[in-house]
Image (tube, rainbow, N blue to C red):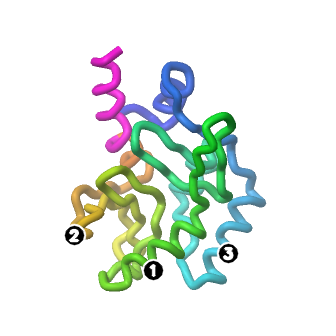
């Protein structure tokens, strides 16, 4: 398995990935306070660690939210902040039993969440909300979801 650092370095140098500057401890604390005030669980430790390396990520249809809204210079692409994303997640998923999930990101066909009930990172199908994959750590989720797309892009290069 590749590490988050290895993946980000490769995508930063070889491809047009949006990799936001690292989050500060104050930004993460403020985000956690906002999450609690909105009635959401705070960020899981593994995701907070990721944010200290990249405060948001978007590439090849995959997004992981940041502590603040990120707008990419030049393209105007907007990456959601995690608080707004969780407000939307709660509104859109009201008919599903997902109140134990913290939304961390999404892709074209999946949603990336942290399940506070079992302490695992899960990939949910956007249509039926079925668990498509689960991981013990955020690093394993990030590598497991991003690396296959890196291989498909490498074949095209």
Q: CA distance from mark 1 to mark 3?
A: 17 Å
Q: Which of these two is toward me, 8 or 87? A: 87
With respect to residue 15, does 67 lie above or below? below
Q: Main secondary structure of the magenta part?
A: helix
Please state the total of marks drawn on the protein image.
3
Does the CB distance between marks 1 and 3 fall below 8 Å? no
CA–CA distance between discs 2 and 3? 29 Å
Circle 1 is placed at which residue position? 91
Q: Secondary structure at mark 2?
A: loop
Secondary element type, mark 3:
helix
Residue found farthest to the right? 26
Quadrant housing residue 53: top right
Magenta stretch containing residue 82, yes or no? no
Looking at the image, is mark 2 or mark 3 earlier in the sequence? 3
User: In the rendering, which numbered label is found on residue 128?
Assistant: 2
- Disc 3 target residue: 34
Q: Nearer the viewer, mark 2 or mark 3?
A: 2
**Residue pictured at 60% horizontal, 55% vertical:** 66
Highlighted magenta segment, given as a residue range: 144-157
Point 47% across, 49% down: residue: 63
In the rendered image, the quadrant that contains the C terminus is: top left
Residue 111 at what x, y percent from top left? 36, 60
Residue 99 appears in which quarter of the rendering? bottom left
Q: Earlier in the sequence, mark 1 or mark 3?
A: 3
Relative to 109, residue 150 above or below:
above
């Amino acid at each position: 398995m590749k590490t988050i650092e290895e993946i980000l370095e490769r995508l930063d140098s070889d491809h047009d990935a949006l990799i936001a500057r690292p989050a500060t401890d104050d930004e993460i604390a403020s985000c956690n306070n906002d999450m609690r005030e909105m009635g959401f669980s705070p960020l899981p430790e593994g995701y907070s660690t990721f944010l200290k390396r990249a405060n948001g990520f978007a590439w090849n249809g995959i997004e992981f939210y940041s502590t603040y809204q990120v707008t990419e210079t030049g393209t105007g692409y907007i990456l959601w902040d995690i608080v707004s994303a969780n407000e939307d997640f709660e509104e859109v998923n009201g008919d599903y039993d997902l109140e134990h999930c913290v939304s961390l990101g999404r892709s074209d066909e999946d949603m990336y969440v942290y399940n506070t009930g079992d302490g695992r990172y899960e990939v949910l199908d956007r249509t039926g909300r079925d668990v498509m994959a689960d991981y013990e750590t955020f690093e394993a989720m990030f590598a497991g979801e991003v690396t296959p797309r890196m291989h498909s892009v490498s074949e095209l290069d």
